[in-house]
Image (spheres, rainbow, N blue to C red):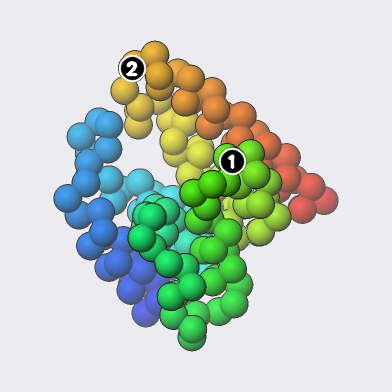
Amino acid sequence: MLLTPLTMKALQVMYKHHQSQVDANNLPYCFHPYDIANEMHSEDEVVCALLHEVIQQENFDVELLPQDWSSELRRALKTLKKEVDESYDTYIKRVADNDIARKVKISDLRHNCARKRLTLRQEDDEELQRYQFYYNYLLEADDAWLG
């Protein structure tokens, strides 16, 4: 992972936020955003990957992101925050239009599709199919952007 003062700060924020959380397999939840960040290349992508779950908290106000962060980084983080009244379809279409957010979400969905992260309940199969559908949609959008 790219380590800069900004990514180190994002890593600290992410860890503080997730330090007591575990995933469905009882593994520390902080591994999820960390694994996604390891797939990113730019500083902005790494920060977005590390913070993509933190910003989903209802009380997290994206307008309070530091003003000295790049406009691209701030825009990507705002894009990754799903609005409470927003359908998931609308959210994914919005994410598809932002290069950084799209890369992070593709990696997030790929990680979520990994069966090792899901328990073996019936609901997980349905969720896995939904993740796979949106993962494929974003991959197609990514291919379109790459031309």
Residue 137 occupies quadrant: top right
Which residue corresponds to mark 1?
87
* Label 1 Cα neighbours within 10 Å, binned few <14 / some 14-19 / many ≥20: few
Residue at 50% of width from left, 56% of height from top? Answer: 81
* Label 2 Cα neighbours within 10 Å, binned few <14 / some 14-19 / many ≥20: few
Image location of residue 14, percent across then percent down: 31, 61
Can residue 38 be seen here? The reply is: no
Q: Are marks 1 and 2 in contact (CB under 8 Å)?
A: no
Spatial CA span between label 1 and label 2: 26 Å
Q: Is residue 146 left or right of residue 19?
A: right
In the image, farthest residue toward the top: 122
Q: Is residue 74 left or right of residue 11?
A: right
* Amino acid, disc 1: Ser
Q: Is residue 23 left or right of residue 69?
A: left
Mark linked to residue 33: none
Please tell me whether mark 1 sits on a helix, a strand or a loop.
loop
Could you tell which of marks 1 and 2 lies nearer the N-terminus?
Answer: 1
* Amino acid, disc 2: Leu
